Amino acid sequence: MRVFYLILLFLCLTPVSRVTGARGPSQKEQNAVARMFAPKDEREVSGVIYNAILRRERECDLSRFRLPQTIFFAHYDPLKLVESNPALQYVARYRCAIQNGIVIKVSFEYKPVPVSYNAQLTQAAEKGVKTILKRLRSDYTPEELVCAISDYIAINCRYAYLRDGKTPDMKAGNAYAALVGHRAVCDGYAGAFMLLAQLFGLEVRKVTGVTQPGNVTHAWNLVKVDGKWYHVDVAWNDPSPDKAGYAGHAYLLLSDNAIGSWRGAKEIHASWRKDIPKADSRKYDDAFWRYERRPISFTKMRFQDYEDKIARTSFEDVIREAVKKKGEANVERFGYRKDQLTEKMRQLYPKIGFRYETNEDGVVLSLGRWEGI
């Protein structure tokens, strides 16, 4: 980040949004929350393993099934069985006891969780659903819902570092960390998004891959909207270090092509698991929300109305409102480089000082910290 000082002066403009009533959780959503920790039928191998993890048992007896180890690892891997339920992603590792090629027992080691884990996560999930619904119009679209879930997590969670402020805290790698502890690494953000999206009936997957440069392991999500799969990376939508009230949207509903390209962060999503669906729709790659750094779902505006408002809002309008509120002006979408912005601001407003932030390409992202107002 580079900081510069300049001078400017101007007035303000206040936008007006339309608000309609929101609804509370439906019976379907309430039932989904109740099923988070519901046991499965133990007549099947998968049910026995799943329920053992649900109860956090140390051992699981599978001797009665006479299950060949090849079948076990191909179809009943415990980590894959709970992958679809982020509420149960607290298995650290497991081991199998095998006799003559038959799996007779599975032993589990768990990540530390509190005794009240189930109750706390259930309460946090219920709060998330209720809050998101309050933020939305009653006739929300799937895109608005996905955005609201991403905004909710970004606003209520921050990236988890150890005391040095640089090393990720890998213990904060599940939905519980994000929704209850309000601090998480990428696995926690992805788990929280998956959990809340499922409670609203969305089809969603967790994606693991690698970012470059650095060859760093990373996690995010795929979500299905109107029959098409799209990438969502809430961890990268959330500013780090955390900025209160901020929620980015550069990594919301992207195609494979877009998620694998540079979109403002210092890294790119270089590769990911090959066993996940393709996201080949580019419908939202350049959507109006790309440069919005505030939780747009909190306005209760229809996305079409919000897009129209942005189209009508000039650079001058954005600056005027920021100065009136003594806040930050998000100007990334205008694409000004520092020299262009310097000249424009000098001509328009010669008597107010400010600082600005640029990205790696020299494009100005924001202005703020006004002086001489």
Image (spheres, rainbow, N blue to C red):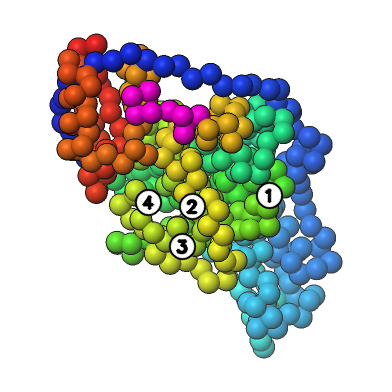
Q: Amino acid at mark 3?
A: Asn
Residue identified by numbered label 2:
285
Determine the CA span between mark 3 and mark 4: 11 Å
Residue identified by numbered label 3:
257
| Mark closer to the chain start, 3 or 4 | 3
2 and 3 marks in contact (CB < 8 Å): yes
Q: Position of residue 295 (x, y in %)?
A: 50, 32
Tag 4's secondary structure? loop
Q: Hey, which quadrant is residue 145 in on the image?
A: top right
Of 137 and 334, nearer the camera is: 334
**In terms of secondary structure, what is the magenta stretch mainly?**
helix
2 and 1 marks in contact (CB < 8 Å): no
Determine the CA span between mark 2 and mark 4: 10 Å
Determine the CA span between mark 1 and mark 3: 23 Å
Q: Residues within 10 Å of mark 4 (few under 14, many from 20)?
A: some
Q: Which residues are magenta?
A: 309-317
Determine the CA span between mark 2 and mark 3: 9 Å
Single out the mark in the foreground, 2 or 4: 2
1 and 4 marks in contact (CB < 8 Å): no
Residue identified by numbered label 4:
263
Q: Left or right of 318: which side holds 37?
A: right
Q: Hey, which quadrant is residue 301 in on the image?
A: top right
| Mark closer to the chain start, 1 or 4 | 1
Q: Position of residue 142 (x, y in %)?
A: 66, 44
Q: Hey, which quadrant is residue 245 in on the image?
A: top left
Q: Amino acid at mark 2?
A: Asp
Of 219 and 180, nearer the camera is: 219
